[in-house]
């Protein structure tokens, strides 16, 4: 597990496209849109200073999991882009990247909570996030690509090691 590096942009592209194809309802970005992005867009994503991405890597230094986090205007951080490749699920990669992202937020003096949105029908993801102390806040929004789905806001305190 480590932070994404700018030179990881090709691996980021590969993993992100895999994620969008494997779990299309887990992300607002759509596969065809991401596929059409030029290399420069992936290079910018990998080198972003506005968003920190933690990645799980295998023995060959291939990215097998990721979670992004960024500071919001209010005293919170937003967890986004959580994904682990199917072959590495259940082996601790998801816990490692989530733990790193929440840990990053806890080290930021202006962040008091970490938020995320998850589809209301995704029981597996909601259960996973609950293991890290996330609880439903009551906040909701319609899933932008398909408003027939509802997303639930979940949050965890960044002020303590819940």
Image (cartoon, rainbow, N blue to C red):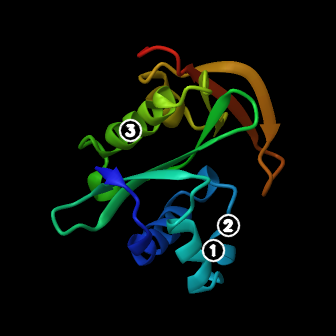
Q: Nearer the viewer, residue 48 or 115?
A: 48
Residue sitting at x 77%, y 25% = 139
Residue 84 in view in this figure:
no
Q: Nearer the viewer, residue 104 or 56?
A: 104
When the figure is inspected, residue 38 is found, relative to residue 75, above or below; the finding is below
- Give the distance between the C-alpha atoms of the residues marked 2 and 3, in whole angstroms: 26 Å
| Helix, strand or loop status at disc 3 | helix
Q: Which residue is mark 3?
A: 100
Q: Is residue 137 left or right of residue 16?
A: right
Q: Residues within 10 Å of mark 3 (few under 14, many from 20)?
A: many
Depth check, mark 2 against mark 3: the one in front is 3
Residue sitting at x 18%, y 69% = 60
| Helix, strand or loop status at disc 1 | helix
Residue sitting at x 30%, y 46% = 93
Task: Verify CB contact (< 8 Å) between mark 2 and mark 1.
Answer: yes
Depth check, mark 3 against mark 1: the one in front is 3
Task: Verify CB contact (< 8 Å) between mark 2 and mark 3.
Answer: no
Q: Residue furthest left?
A: 59
Residue 103 in view in this figure:
yes
Q: Which residue is mark 2?
A: 30
Residue sitting at x 23%, y 43% = 91
Q: Nearer the viewer, residue 8 or 64?
A: 8
Q: Residues within 10 Å of mark 2 (few under 14, many from 20)?
A: some
| Quarter assignment of residue 118 | top right
- Give the distance between the C-alpha atoms of the residues marked 3 and 1, in whole angstroms: 25 Å
Q: Which residue is mark 1?
A: 34
Q: Is residue 95 left or right of residue 155?
A: left
- Give the distance between the C-alpha atoms of the residues marked 2 and 1, in whole angstroms: 6 Å
**Pointer 3 or 1: first along the chain:** 1
**Pointer 2 or 3: first along the chain:** 2
């Amino acid at each position: 597990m480590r932070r994404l590096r700018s030179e990881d942009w090709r691996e980021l592209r590969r993993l992100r496209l895999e994620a969008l194809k494997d779990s299309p309802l887990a992300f607002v970005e759509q596969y065809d849109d991401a596929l059409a992005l030029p290399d420069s867009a992936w290079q910018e994503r990998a080198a972003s200073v506005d968003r920190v991405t933690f990645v799980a890597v295998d023995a060959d230094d291939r990215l097998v999991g990721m979670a992004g986090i960024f500071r919001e205007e209010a005293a919170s951080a937003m967890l986004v882009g959580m994904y682990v490749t199917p072959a590495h699920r259940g082996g601790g990669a998801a816990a490692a990247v989530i733990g790193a992202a929440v840990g990053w937020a806890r080290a930021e003096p202006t962040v008091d909570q970490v938020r995320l949105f998850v589809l209301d029908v995704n029981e597996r993801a909601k259960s996973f996030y609950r293991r890290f102390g996330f609880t439903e806040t009551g906040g909701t929004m319609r899933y932008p690509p398909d408003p027939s789905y509802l997303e639930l806001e979940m949050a965890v305190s960044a002020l303590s090691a819940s």
